[in-house]
Image (cartoon, grey):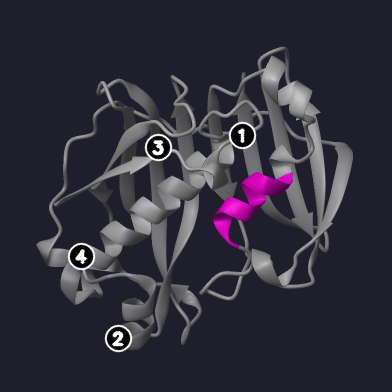
Amino acid sequence: MKLIKHQRVSASISDADANFSVLGIFQTIQDAVTELLGRLKMDNPTMRKQYNAVWLFTRNRVKLFNSILWGDEFTVTAFVSSITNATLSVDVSIKNADGVLCAYSRVETCALSLTAMRILRLQTLDAIAAVTIEKPEIEIAFTKFDCSPTTKVDTVRVGSTNIDFSQHTNNVEYIRFILNTYTVKEQHDRPIREIEIRYISQSYENNVLTIYKQNCGNDKDVFLLKSADKDTVKCELLF
Protein backbone atom coordinates (compact mmCIF):
# COMPACT_ATOMS: atom_id res chain seq x y z
CA MET A 1 0.00 0.00 0.00
CA LYS A 2 1.13 3.53 -0.79
CA LEU A 3 -0.29 6.66 0.78
CA ILE A 4 -0.40 9.47 -1.79
CA LYS A 5 -1.53 12.98 -0.82
CA HIS A 6 -1.63 16.23 -2.76
CA GLN A 7 -1.10 19.33 -0.63
CA ARG A 8 0.02 22.96 -0.71
CA VAL A 9 2.74 24.66 1.30
CA SER A 10 0.73 26.56 3.89
CA ALA A 11 1.87 29.49 6.04
CA SER A 12 2.28 27.26 9.10
CA ILE A 13 4.92 25.11 7.38
CA SER A 14 6.78 27.97 5.66
CA ASP A 15 10.05 29.51 6.84
CA ALA A 16 11.33 33.09 6.96
CA ASP A 17 12.15 32.93 3.23
CA ALA A 18 8.62 31.72 2.32
CA ASN A 19 9.93 28.23 1.50
CA PHE A 20 8.68 24.87 2.79
CA SER A 21 10.53 24.87 6.11
CA VAL A 22 12.75 22.10 7.42
CA LEU A 23 10.50 21.83 10.46
CA GLY A 24 7.43 21.75 8.20
CA ILE A 25 8.97 18.92 6.18
CA PHE A 26 9.51 16.90 9.38
CA GLN A 27 5.90 17.61 10.41
CA THR A 28 4.67 16.48 6.98
CA ILE A 29 6.75 13.30 7.20
CA GLN A 30 5.34 12.53 10.65
CA ASP A 31 1.78 13.07 9.40
CA ALA A 32 2.39 10.81 6.39
CA VAL A 33 3.86 7.99 8.51
CA THR A 34 1.06 8.11 11.07
CA GLU A 35 -1.67 8.32 8.41
CA LEU A 36 -0.18 5.35 6.56
CA LEU A 37 -0.15 3.34 9.81
CA GLY A 38 -3.77 4.35 10.31
CA ARG A 39 -4.74 3.01 6.89
CA LEU A 40 -2.92 -0.20 7.79
CA LYS A 41 -5.03 -0.33 10.99
CA MET A 42 -1.93 0.11 13.14
CA ASP A 43 -2.09 3.77 14.22
CA ASN A 44 -1.31 4.58 17.85
CA PRO A 45 -4.93 4.81 19.09
CA THR A 46 -5.57 1.36 17.58
CA MET A 47 -2.29 -0.02 18.92
CA ARG A 48 -3.07 1.20 22.43
CA LYS A 49 -6.59 -0.23 22.33
CA GLN A 50 -5.62 -3.65 20.96
CA TYR A 51 -2.14 -4.20 22.43
CA ASN A 52 -1.59 -1.45 25.01
CA ALA A 53 1.35 -0.44 22.85
CA VAL A 54 2.52 2.61 20.89
CA TRP A 55 4.84 3.20 17.96
CA LEU A 56 8.11 4.98 18.72
CA PHE A 57 10.28 6.66 16.10
CA THR A 58 13.80 5.29 16.61
CA ARG A 59 15.55 7.24 13.86
CA ASN A 60 14.88 9.33 10.78
CA ARG A 61 17.15 10.49 7.97
CA VAL A 62 15.93 13.21 5.62
CA LYS A 63 17.60 14.37 2.41
CA LEU A 64 16.66 17.81 1.11
CA PHE A 65 17.09 18.47 -2.61
CA ASN A 66 14.93 21.39 -3.79
CA SER A 67 12.81 24.14 -2.24
CA ILE A 68 9.04 24.50 -2.61
CA LEU A 69 7.51 27.94 -2.24
CA TRP A 70 4.68 28.97 0.07
CA GLY A 71 1.40 28.29 -1.75
CA ASP A 72 2.86 25.82 -4.24
CA GLU A 73 1.50 22.30 -4.64
CA PHE A 74 3.41 19.19 -3.65
CA THR A 75 2.77 15.45 -3.47
CA VAL A 76 3.61 13.23 -0.50
CA THR A 77 4.05 9.49 -0.98
CA ALA A 78 4.58 7.13 1.98
CA PHE A 79 5.08 3.38 2.02
CA VAL A 80 6.63 0.60 4.11
CA SER A 81 10.14 -0.11 2.83
CA SER A 82 11.23 -2.83 5.28
CA ILE A 83 10.09 -4.92 8.25
CA THR A 84 12.26 -6.84 10.72
CA ASN A 85 11.33 -8.66 13.92
CA ALA A 86 11.55 -5.39 15.84
CA THR A 87 11.38 -2.49 13.35
CA LEU A 88 9.17 -1.15 10.60
CA SER A 89 10.61 1.46 8.23
CA VAL A 90 8.55 3.93 6.22
CA ASP A 91 9.92 5.91 3.29
CA VAL A 92 8.36 9.29 2.51
CA SER A 93 8.98 11.28 -0.67
CA ILE A 94 7.94 14.88 -1.26
CA LYS A 95 7.79 16.08 -4.87
CA ASN A 96 6.86 19.44 -6.34
CA ALA A 97 4.08 20.00 -8.89
CA ASP A 98 6.46 19.02 -11.71
CA GLY A 99 7.26 15.69 -10.05
CA VAL A 100 10.77 16.76 -9.03
CA LEU A 101 11.99 15.15 -5.81
CA CYS A 102 12.39 17.81 -3.11
CA ALA A 103 12.79 15.73 0.05
CA TYR A 104 13.11 12.06 0.91
CA SER A 105 12.98 10.40 4.31
CA ARG A 106 13.36 7.01 5.90
CA VAL A 107 11.73 6.66 9.32
CA GLU A 108 12.51 3.62 11.46
CA THR A 109 9.91 2.74 14.09
CA CYS A 110 9.35 0.10 16.75
CA ALA A 111 6.31 -0.87 18.83
CA LEU A 112 6.65 -0.50 22.60
CA SER A 113 4.46 -2.54 24.94
CA LEU A 114 3.21 -0.23 27.69
CA THR A 115 2.42 -3.25 29.84
CA ALA A 116 5.85 -4.91 29.74
CA MET A 117 7.79 -1.76 28.72
CA ARG A 118 9.65 -3.74 26.08
CA ILE A 119 9.77 -3.83 22.28
CA LEU A 120 7.10 -6.03 20.68
CA ARG A 121 7.89 -8.60 18.02
CA LEU A 122 6.06 -7.15 15.02
CA GLN A 123 4.93 -10.59 13.86
CA THR A 124 2.59 -10.66 16.89
CA LEU A 125 0.54 -7.80 15.39
CA ASP A 126 -2.48 -9.08 13.50
CA ALA A 127 -2.26 -6.43 10.77
CA ILE A 128 1.42 -6.91 9.97
CA ALA A 129 0.84 -9.93 7.70
CA ALA A 130 -1.13 -7.79 5.26
CA VAL A 131 1.57 -5.12 4.90
CA THR A 132 3.15 -4.85 1.46
CA ILE A 133 6.81 -3.87 1.29
CA GLU A 134 7.55 -1.41 -1.52
CA LYS A 135 10.85 -0.70 -3.27
CA PRO A 136 12.56 2.54 -2.09
CA GLU A 137 12.77 5.39 -4.58
CA ILE A 138 16.32 6.17 -3.45
CA GLU A 139 18.62 4.47 -0.96
CA ILE A 140 19.26 5.95 2.48
CA ALA A 141 21.88 4.68 4.93
CA PHE A 142 21.88 5.61 8.59
CA THR A 143 25.13 6.96 10.06
CA LYS A 144 27.21 5.84 13.03
CA PHE A 145 27.64 9.39 14.44
CA ASP A 146 31.43 9.51 14.60
CA CYS A 147 31.51 12.95 16.28
CA SER A 148 30.81 13.59 19.99
CA PRO A 149 29.28 17.00 20.90
CA THR A 150 30.88 18.68 23.91
CA THR A 151 29.87 22.36 23.76
CA LYS A 152 26.71 23.33 25.64
CA VAL A 153 24.65 25.70 23.48
CA ASP A 154 21.16 25.76 25.05
CA THR A 155 18.78 24.34 27.63
CA VAL A 156 15.06 23.77 26.99
CA ARG A 157 12.27 22.83 29.36
CA VAL A 158 9.74 20.47 27.77
CA GLY A 159 6.32 22.12 27.86
CA SER A 160 2.80 20.79 27.53
CA THR A 161 2.55 21.61 23.81
CA ASN A 162 5.66 19.49 23.12
CA ILE A 163 3.89 16.35 24.37
CA ASP A 164 2.09 13.92 22.04
CA PHE A 165 -0.36 10.99 22.34
CA SER A 166 2.38 8.75 23.74
CA GLN A 167 2.79 11.23 26.63
CA HIS A 168 6.39 11.99 25.74
CA THR A 169 8.15 14.72 23.76
CA ASN A 170 7.04 14.51 20.15
CA ASN A 171 9.82 13.57 17.74
CA VAL A 172 9.44 16.75 15.66
CA GLU A 173 9.87 18.94 18.74
CA TYR A 174 13.51 17.85 19.05
CA ILE A 175 14.09 19.20 15.53
CA ARG A 176 12.51 22.48 16.65
CA PHE A 177 14.82 22.66 19.68
CA ILE A 178 17.89 22.00 17.51
CA LEU A 179 16.96 24.43 14.73
CA ASN A 180 16.31 27.15 17.30
CA THR A 181 20.03 27.12 18.16
CA TYR A 182 20.62 28.75 14.74
CA THR A 183 19.65 32.30 13.80
CA VAL A 184 17.42 33.06 10.81
CA LYS A 185 20.46 34.43 8.97
CA GLU A 186 22.50 31.29 9.66
CA GLN A 187 19.73 29.09 8.30
CA HIS A 188 19.40 31.32 5.22
CA ASP A 189 23.13 31.50 4.50
CA ARG A 190 23.85 27.83 5.24
CA PRO A 191 20.93 25.74 4.01
CA ILE A 192 20.62 22.22 5.37
CA ARG A 193 20.85 19.42 2.82
CA GLU A 194 20.53 16.40 5.09
CA ILE A 195 19.48 15.57 8.67
CA GLU A 196 19.60 12.37 10.65
CA ILE A 197 18.10 12.15 14.11
CA ARG A 198 18.31 9.18 16.47
CA TYR A 199 15.87 8.90 19.35
CA ILE A 200 17.81 7.19 22.15
CA SER A 201 15.44 7.59 25.11
CA GLN A 202 12.23 9.41 25.94
CA SER A 203 11.74 12.76 27.67
CA TYR A 204 8.60 14.09 29.32
CA GLU A 205 6.77 17.24 30.35
CA ASN A 206 8.89 19.51 32.59
CA ASN A 207 12.12 17.64 31.80
CA VAL A 208 15.03 19.99 31.14
CA LEU A 209 16.99 19.14 28.00
CA THR A 210 20.61 20.27 27.70
CA ILE A 211 21.73 20.71 24.10
CA TYR A 212 25.37 20.08 23.15
CA LYS A 213 26.85 20.84 19.74
CA GLN A 214 30.03 19.98 17.89
CA ASN A 215 31.10 21.43 14.55
CA CYS A 216 32.71 18.60 12.60
CA GLY A 217 34.00 20.60 9.65
CA ASN A 218 32.45 23.13 7.31
CA ASP A 219 29.64 20.84 6.24
CA LYS A 220 28.55 19.02 9.43
CA ASP A 221 27.21 19.84 12.89
CA VAL A 222 26.35 17.13 15.41
CA PHE A 223 24.04 17.61 18.40
CA LEU A 224 23.45 15.64 21.58
CA LEU A 225 20.43 16.32 23.79
CA LYS A 226 20.53 15.08 27.37
CA SER A 227 17.85 14.86 30.04
CA ALA A 228 19.23 14.58 33.59
CA ASP A 229 22.59 13.49 32.15
CA LYS A 230 20.88 10.73 30.14
CA ASP A 231 21.40 10.72 26.37
CA THR A 232 18.03 11.42 24.77
CA VAL A 233 18.62 12.41 21.14
CA LYS A 234 21.57 12.60 18.77
CA CYS A 235 21.32 14.50 15.51
CA GLU A 236 23.55 15.18 12.52
CA LEU A 237 23.08 18.12 10.14
CA LEU A 238 24.86 18.29 6.79
CA PHE A 239 25.12 21.59 4.89
Please, what secondary structure does the residue beneath circle 2 have?
A: helix
Res. 204 image quadrant: bottom right
**Vertical comparison of 61 with 84: above or below:** above
* Identity, as a three-letter code, of the amino acid under mark 3: Ser
Tag 2 near tag 4, CB within 8 Å: no
Q: Residue at x 80, y 46 (%)?
A: 211
Q: How far across and down, in percent of the image, does residue 26 sit?
A: 50, 44
Q: CA distance from mark 4 to mark 3?
A: 19 Å
Q: How far across and down, in percent of the image, does residue 16 sit?
A: 66, 31
Magenta-span inclusion, residue 171: yes
**Vertical comparison of 191 with 201: above or below:** above
**Direction from residue 90 to residue 1 in the image, left or right:** left
Tag 4 near tag 3, CB within 8 Å: no
Q: Which residue is mark 1?
A: 15
* Identity, as a three-letter code, of the amino acid under mark 4: Leu
Bounds of the magenta segment: 170-177
Please, what secondary structure does the residue beneath circle 1 have?
A: loop
Q: Nearer the viewer, mark 3 or mark 1?
A: 1
* Identity, as a three-letter code, of the amino acid under mark 1: Asp
Q: Which residue is mark 3?
A: 105
